[in-house]
Image (spheres, grey):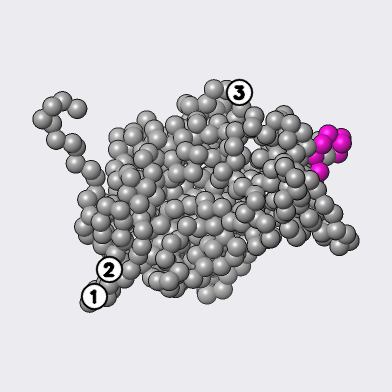
């Protein structure tokens, strides 16, 4: 900086704002973009010094589980391409000023894999923030929260390292990124996923990994070329998506440890509870008990790594009244990602998985990943704008003669329906003015909150590999669930599909 020049003023100094968003990962970035498009003033605060959230550090061994297909059946500039790109953030179709921020992930990939490297994902997010002109106050750590009463509902006060921020609405997009360790005697002798060393430092060592979900298998896969032996253990069997045909559990990218186990290559995979970790000479002894027989076993290891999951870094929000549940301490949430117990506090990004929807066929939504959370953030911005600031969102009229074809096209190509199966729906409602496009809604909102007759189209997977559209038709106060045929090439615009859907929505006057 030249002599005599004052430093540039930092964005969002302490004070009062309509909305305060905490975080700078994908959820916060997408929400900030959507709020700005709706004209809702807000401040964004982050303790990090650049955008990207957890992708600035993890995954340790660099490849993501989520894919982006650089060359797909749809053009990159189109909404349809979002089906094939799980990692880019969303730019509205009518936002010509920021068209260069659309479908960014593929532009940073080197072609060696359609699973982006961690650094490629970080570059994607940073470029989105830069190209869309998002403003964030970096290096500002949220420390505490309180509520001050007032005639209009009061204000939340966020205490930070830079001062106090007051707001009517607070949105926390802080991830589920705080390692959780089980209450195992000697757990302090292990190190967590967050403190794993470079892979080469495990060369020739015996490694015991607590946990058999994504993080455990990621570590095992990354250490296979280096470790002399690897054991993975947790009380329950791993849920392999290649077997269950869902997107929950260990993805096919992490199956190599199973191959080494089957071939006797030095990998052990145990269904066993961990009873204790103890010093043993220069190493550690891990005592376990098998889940099937109760047989006690002991293993000697040079390193023990706890990859047993993560919790939400909610600080004092539970003391403020925010109810949480489960090991991950996810906040209990309404249909619209608002705290179920403290109105005015919302959650974006990975934390949104606390709103699980109907869990049709036992399958939760993909809200814990970018390709699901980005659509949730768009809907959350709309909800905040409408209910907290009286900003109406357009619901255009639809020609009834085109409704059936339009819904079937959504089921075939709509990225929201494909990425958030049985969770998000394309909805139409009937009224005195005619047929209105409600846009994308949480399915639960259509079923429980929309009072007028209408139809909601979803795409659902039943866990056997079958994927097909399902229409929910409300007529005269009752809802009928109509499963449409599947199709080997996932084309749901055929004459058979048109006939079934037309019969289902006939009571609404559609054809």
Q: Magenta segment: does it hold 264?
A: yes
Instruction: Name the residue nearer the viewer: 57 or 92.
Output: 57
> Could you say where residue 113 lies in the image, as x and y percent from the top left?
61, 27
Residue beneath the point at 31% across and 56% down: 160
Give the mark nearest the N terminus, 1 or 3.
Answer: 3
State the SS at label 1: loop
Tell me which label, 2 or 1, sits earlier in the chain: 1
> CA–CA distance between discs 1 and 3?
57 Å
Numbered range of the magenta stretch: 262-268
Image position, residue 376 (x, y; %) = 47, 53
CB atoms of marks 1 and 3 within 8 Å: no
Q: Quadrant for residue 389, please give it.
A: bottom left
Rendered residue at 72%/50% (across/down):
279
Query: Compared with residue 420, is residue 442 higher up or lower down, i.e. above or below?
Result: below
Residue at image mark 3? 112
Q: Residues within 10 Å of mark 2 (few under 14, many from 20)?
A: many
**Circle 2: element type:** strand
Marks 2 and 1, how far apart at CA: 7 Å
Decide whether residue 457 is among the magenta residues: no
Dot 3 crowding, Cα within 10 Å, few <14, some 14–19, many 20+: few
Disc 3 secondary structure class: loop
Q: Which mark is residue 150?
A: 1
Q: Who's the residue at 53% across and 45% down the image?
A: 371
Residue 260 appears left or right of 359:
right
Q: Tell me if 278 is positioned left or right of 68 in this view.
A: right
């Amino acid at each position: 900086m030249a002599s005599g020049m004052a430093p540039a003023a930092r964005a969002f100094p302490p004070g009062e704002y309509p909305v305060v968003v905490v975080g700078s990962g994908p959820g916060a970035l997408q929400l900030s973009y959507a709020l700005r498009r709706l004209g809702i003033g807000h401040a964004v605060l982050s303790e990090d010094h650049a955008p990207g959230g957890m992708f600035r550090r993890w995954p340790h061994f660099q490849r993501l589980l989520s894919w982006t297909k650089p060359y797909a059946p749809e053009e990159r500039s189109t909404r349809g391409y979002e089906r094939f790109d799980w990692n880019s953030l969303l730019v509205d179709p009518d936002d010509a000023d920021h068209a260069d921020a659309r479908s960014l992930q593929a532009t940073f990939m080197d072609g060696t894999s359609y699973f982006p490297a961690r650094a490629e994902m970080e570059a994607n997010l940073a470029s989105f923030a830069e190209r869309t002109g998002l403003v964030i106050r970096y290096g500002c750590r949220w420390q505490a929260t309180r509520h001050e009463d007032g005639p209009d509902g009061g204000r939340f006060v966020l205490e930070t390292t830079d001062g106090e921020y007051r707001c009517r609405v607070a949105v926390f997009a802080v991830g589920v990124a705080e390692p959780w360790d089980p209450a195992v005697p000697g757990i302090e002798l292990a190190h967590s996923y967050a403190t794993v060393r470079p892979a080469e430092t495990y060369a020739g060592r015996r490694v015991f990994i607590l946990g058999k979900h994504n993080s455990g298998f990621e570590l095992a896969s990354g250490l296979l070329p280096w470790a002399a032996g690897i054991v993975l253990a947790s009380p329950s069997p791993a849920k392999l998506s290649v077997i269950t045909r869902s997107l929950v559990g260990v993805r096919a990218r992490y199956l190599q440890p199973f191959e080494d186990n089957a071939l006797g290559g030095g990998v052990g995979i145990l269904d066993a509870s961990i009873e204790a970790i103890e010093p043993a000479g220069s190493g550690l002894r891990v005592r376990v008990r098998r889940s099937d027989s109760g047989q006690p076993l002991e293993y000697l290891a040079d390193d023990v790594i706890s990859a047993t999951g993560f919790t939400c870094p909610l600080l004092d929000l539970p003391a403020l009244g925010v109810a949480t549940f489960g090991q991950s301490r996810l906040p209990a949430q309404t249909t619209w990602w608002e705290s179920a117990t403290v109105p005015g506090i919302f959650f974006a990004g990975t934390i949104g998985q606390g709103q699980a929807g109907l869990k049709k066929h036992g399958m939760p939504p993909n809200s814990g990943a970018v390709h699901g959370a980005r659509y949730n953030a768009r809907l959350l911005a709309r909800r905040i704008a409408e209910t907290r600031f009286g900003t109406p969102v357009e619901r255009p009229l639809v020609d009834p003669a085109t409704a059936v074809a339009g819904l079937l096209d959504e089921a075939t190509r709509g990225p929201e329906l494909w990425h958030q199966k049985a969770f998000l729906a394309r909805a139409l409602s009937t009224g005195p003015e005619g047929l209105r496009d409600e846009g994308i809604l949480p399915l639960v909102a259509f079923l429980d909150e929309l009072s007028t007759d209408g139809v909601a189209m979803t795409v659902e997977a039943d866990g056997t590999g079958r994927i097909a559209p399902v229409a929910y038709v409300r007529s005269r106060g009752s809802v009928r669930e109509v499963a449409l045929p599947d199709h080997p090439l996932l084309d749901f615009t055929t004459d058979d599909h048109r006939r079934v859907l037309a019969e289902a929505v006939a009571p609404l006057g559609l054809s």
